[in-house]
Image: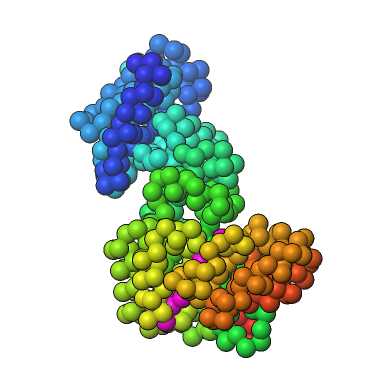
Amino acid sequence: MTPENLISRIARFEEAASEQLPGGVLLVQVDRFRQLRGQLGFRLLFALIRKVRARLADGVGERGEVFRFGLSRFVIVVPQAAADELQDLAGQLFNGLSRQNFDVNDESMAISVSMALARFDHRFAGADRMLVALSERLEKVLSGGGNELSFVEPGVSATLAMDSEDHMLGLLMEALRHNRVKVVFQPLLATRDNEPKRSFQMLPRLETSDGELITAAEFIPVARAARLLPVLDRWMVTHAVKLFRGPLKAQPVRLFINQSNALLTDSERMNWLLEALARMSEMAGRIVVELPLDDAMSHMKHSARLIEGTREYGGGVCFSMVDEHSRWDLLAGDLNCDFLRMSPGFVARLSTEPDLERRFLELSEPVRERGVRIIMPMIEDQETAASMWRTGADFMQGNMIQEPENTIALEE
C-alpha cells in the first residue's frame, strides 16, 4: 500500500470514530536503525524488519492492521477502540518487542523500539496532520535515546486556530468536552458611590497549546455555525454557579453573562436557567443575563418572560448593542430590562458628535426613569472616558479602565 493510500485509509477510520470508541494510530520506530544497517547489511536488516512486523501483527491480531511506513517504521491502525484499550494494546506491543529476541543469521538479537500513540481526534484536522504529530514526537523521543512509549495529544497553536476554522472548532469542542474553557473577568466601573456590588463581565476564552488566549469575538462565529452556542451558554452559567458556591460565595459581586438567542428560542433552556436561579439563593441579585437587543425584539414574548422570571428570583437582564436607532420605546415599555449596554460603535461616535450626545440624553431619559442602568463599553482612551462622564452613564468598561483578569480581586 502506498503512503498516500495509507493516509486515505486512516482518514476513513477517523471519520468513523466516535467519542466512546475513538480508535487511533500507533507509530512504531525500530531504534538504532543506522547502527543495525551497518552491522547487518540491508539483506539481514530487512529480514529483521519483517520479523518485527510479524510480531506486531500477532500482537495486534484482529483489533487492527499493521503497515510498513518507510524503511524502519510501522503504522498500526486500531479502529473503534476505547481509549484505555488503545493504551493497553500499545503497552503490550511495546513490552513484547522489548522483552523478546529475534533470530538473525544464527544469532539472537535484542532490539528496542520507540512508539507514539494518538487517538483519533478532530483537533488533528485530518490523518495527515495526525501522522505529522506522531512523527514529530518520535523524532523528539529518538533524539533523547529512544526506547520509549509516548502518547500524543493534539495541540492547536494560536496561529493555526486563527488560520483554520476546523482547528478553531476542534479547539472549542475539546475545551467544552473537557471543561477547559478559560474565563476572564473585566470590571465595570460604577460612576456612583452608592453601588453596593462590584460588577464584572464574564468573558470566555480558548487557550491554545502555545499559551495564547483566543477571544470570544474570534471563535463565536465558528461556534454559531456549528450550533455550539447553546452548549457554551450553559457552560458559562454553570461556571458562574460554581464561582458563587466557591470563591465568590461571600463576596459582593455581580456577574454579567452573555447568552445566545437559543435562550429565547428554546423553552427548555429558559426553564433550566430560571429553575437554576430559583433553587440557588446564593445567585440572587448577582447574575445578569445579557443578550443582544435585536434577539430580544425578535422574540418579544420570551424576552418578557425572561425579564419577569429573572427578577422574580433576584437576577437581572441586560440588552446589548443599543444605539440611537434602537427601539427606545420598547426599552421603556415591554422590554424594560435592568441594564442596557450601548454598542461599541455608538460609544466611538458619541465622543466626536455633540448632537448625538444630546440625542442620547433625550432618548435615554424615559428608560432611566424606570430604573434601567446604562453601560458604556470599549472605553479605550481618556477623551472617550471624559465624554462618557457627561452622559451620566452608570457604568463604564474598557481596557483603559482595566483589562480582563484571570480572577476577581476585590480591594479590602
Which quadrant, please, contains the C terminus? Answer: bottom right
Identity of the residue drawn at 68% across and 62% down = 347
- Residue farthest right in this picture: 383
Horizontally, residue 83 falls left or right of residue 409, namely left
Image spot of residue 339 (x, y percent): 53, 73
Give the x, y percent position of residue 409. 60, 76
Q: Which residues are magenta?
A: 314-321
Q: Left or right? Give the position of 289 relative to 24.
A: right
Judging depth in this view, the residue of 340 and 141 nearest the camera is 340
- Residue at position x 46%, y 13% in the image: 41
Residue 66's x, y, as percent? 31, 26
Choose between 172 and 259: the one closer to the eye.
Answer: 259
Dominant secondary structure, magenta: strand
345 lies above or below 48: below
The outermost residue toward the left is: 62
Q: x, y (%) of residue 142?
A: 51, 34
Quadrant of the rendered image containing residue 390: bottom right
Is residue 242 at least partly visible in the picture?
Answer: no
Q: Assign the N terminus to one quadrant of the image.
A: top left
Residue 3 location, quadrant: top left
User: How many discs mark residues in the rendered view?
Assistant: 0
Rendered position, 227 above or below 320: above
Residue 20 seen in this snapshot: yes
Q: Residue at x 33, y 37 (%)?
A: 24
Q: Residue at x 48, y 58 (%)?
A: 294
**316 is within the stretch colored magenta:** yes
Does the magenta run of residues contain 306? no
Determine the image quadrant of residue 231: bottom left
